[in-house]
Image: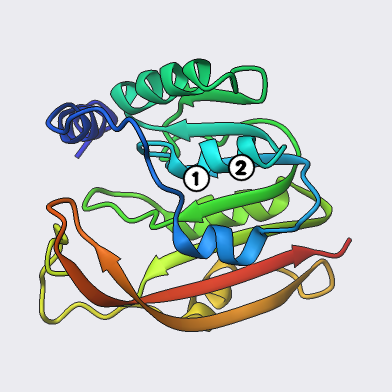
Amino acid sequence: MNATDAITFWDEVHAAREPATEPRPNARLTEYLTGLTPGDALDLGCGEGGDALWLAGEGWRVTAVDISAVAVERLAALAGARGLGDRLTAARHDLHTSFPPGEFDLVSAHYLHTPLDLDRAAVLRSAAHALRPGGRLLVVDHGSAAPWSWNRDPDIRFPTPREIAEGIALDPAGWTVERADTRRRVATGPGGQTAEVTDHVLLLRRTA
């Protein structure tokens, strides 16, 4: 599938949903980052924008990117309505072909999964290199498929956090793994249904 098809796919996914008025931040984001000194943050695959809005509300200067112009335009409108437009920049960006410029104290990649072609390890490697010394990369992946997931393949295997770190292949002299956890929680689906799901959490810090 080419880039145009990917853009169309995700635009249609977001356009089919009612615009979120109160998007929630992901549980692992608030769990791991509450109390961290704010700086410059990059949200990869921002979707409805719950993470980006929470970060901006906590004092971070946020760049939020998504391949879908529908998602980006809705997030920009929400940020403006909440008075966060000066701390949150939403931009359409195709991670398949390029990476957002700049240096960051935090890069967040929550559930950066897609049924389309994407070299995720290369994207996360670029994210790690975009960190300032002392900055952190937080990667939260599905460790199980929720009942409402678009991917219900019973044979799918979810890489562990350590395997994800190995795939990024960073020099240990410049980056360290702070956490590599498998966590369970009760999640709520788009229709209000609930289920216990597994999260794979990888937290990397740039040391040099």
Closer to us: 117 or 137: 137
**Mark 2 residue type:** Leu
| Residue 187 higher or lower than 198, as above or below | above
**Mark 1 residue type:** Asp
Give residue 175's position: percent from left, percent from top.
77, 68
Give residue 126's position: percent from left, percent from top.
62, 49
Question: Mark 1 near mark 2, Cβ–Cβ under 8 Å?
Answer: yes
Q: Residue at x 42, y 16 (%)?
A: 77
Residue under pointer 2: 55
| Residue 38 higher or lower than 86, as above or below | below
Q: Quadrant of residue 20?
A: top left
Secondary element at image label 1 = helix
On screen, residue 103 versus residue 203, left or right, reads right
Q: Residues within 10 Å of mark 1 (few under 14, many from 20)?
A: many
Visible residue check, residue 145? no
Secondary element at image label 2 = helix
Closer to us: 30 or 144: 30
| Residue 84 higher or lower than 3, as above or below | above
Residue under pointer 1: 51
Visible residue check, residue 68? yes
Q: Residue at x 12, y 69 (%)?
A: 147
